[in-house]
Amino acid sequence: MKEQQTSIMHYRFTAYLETSVVNKRARYLKNKNCLKEQEYIMVDLLDKNCTCFDVELDFYIREKLVEDLEKSDDLLKIIGEDRLLRAIASLKERERILLFGRVFGELEFSKLGKKLTMTPKQAEMAYYYVIRKIRKKLEEKKDEF
Amino acid sequence: MSFEELLRRAKAGDQKAQEAIFLLYRSMLNKHSMVWNVFDEDLFQELSATLYTCIMKFRI
């Protein structure tokens, strides 16, 4: 009889504990998720409050360029770097349009090719030729120092 | 020792009895401490505290 009572108490305690544990777990997970959400909100707020000047400049340059690729002289003023500026200034007008169209305008070679009356493959080759040319000029300037 | 006796002692503050009950229910606490198949130690600690509270609050 006593054994039966003990086992009943054991079951009762187990059931009591199980319920408490399940409730506690649910509350813990809810709190944890709330905290995580708060963290995400804080990060979002921080992102919105700060101004990233690199991104702003990038937007500005893109807007300027997409408007009119022919106005590449204006862009030379935007790019601050002196050596790079000189290297780009020494390029031909055609090469400049190709370079800016690809780098800032993010145009495909097929579109650039149409603009400059070339095949896409030719435009691609010309683009890499321009890049090599600029790199060579930059390295020359480095050697001078 | 019967479970009732163990519980009474644990309620009275006997550390060995409390430990025995903890060992008895540890597997259950482990099971409930798994979150997305990962063992959450903080949750395990919280549940261990709950076990202690249950021992103290349970009416015999």
Image (cartoon, coloured by chain):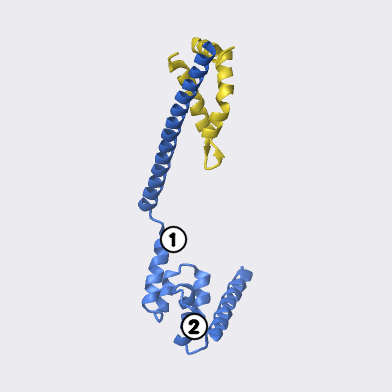
Chain colours: A blue, B yellow
Q: Earlier in the sequence, mark 2 or mark 1?
A: 1
Front-lying residue, A40 or B50: B50
Classify A66 as above or below B5: below
Instruction: Count the numbered circles shown.
Output: 2
**Residue B26: x and y, percent?**
57, 26
Q: Chain of mark 2?
A: A
Is residue A55 shown left or right of residue B32? left
Q: Which mark is residue B31?
A: none
Query: Label 2: which residue?
Result: A110
* Pick the front one: A45 or A25: A25
Q: Residue at x 51, y 75 (%)?
A: A86
Callout 2–callout 1 Cβ contact below 8 Å: no
Residue A66's quadrant in the figure? bottom left
Residue shown at 40% from the left, 75% from the top: A65
Residue at coordinates 52% horizontally, 18% vertically from top-left?
Answer: A7
In front: mark 2 or mark 1? Answer: 2
Q: Nearer the viewer, residue A51 or B46?
A: B46
Instruction: Identify the mark at residue A54; answer none if there is no mark.
Output: 1
Residue A75: x %, y % from top left: 42, 74
Mark 1 crowd level (few <14, some 14–19, many ≥20, 10 Å Cα): few
- Asked if A95 appears above or below B40 in the picture, the reply is below
Give the farthest residue toward the bottom: A117
Report, in whole angstroms, how far the alpha carbon at label 2 lies from the one at label 1: 29 Å
Q: Position of residue A81 (x, y in %)?
A: 49, 67
Density class for disc 2 (Cα within 10 Å; few <14, some 14-19, many ≥20) is some
Q: What is the three-letter code of the residue carrying label 2? A: Ser
Q: In this picture, is A142 found above or below A17?
A: below
Q: Percent position (x, y) of residue B52?
A: 49, 20
Q: Is residue A91 above or below residue B17?
A: below
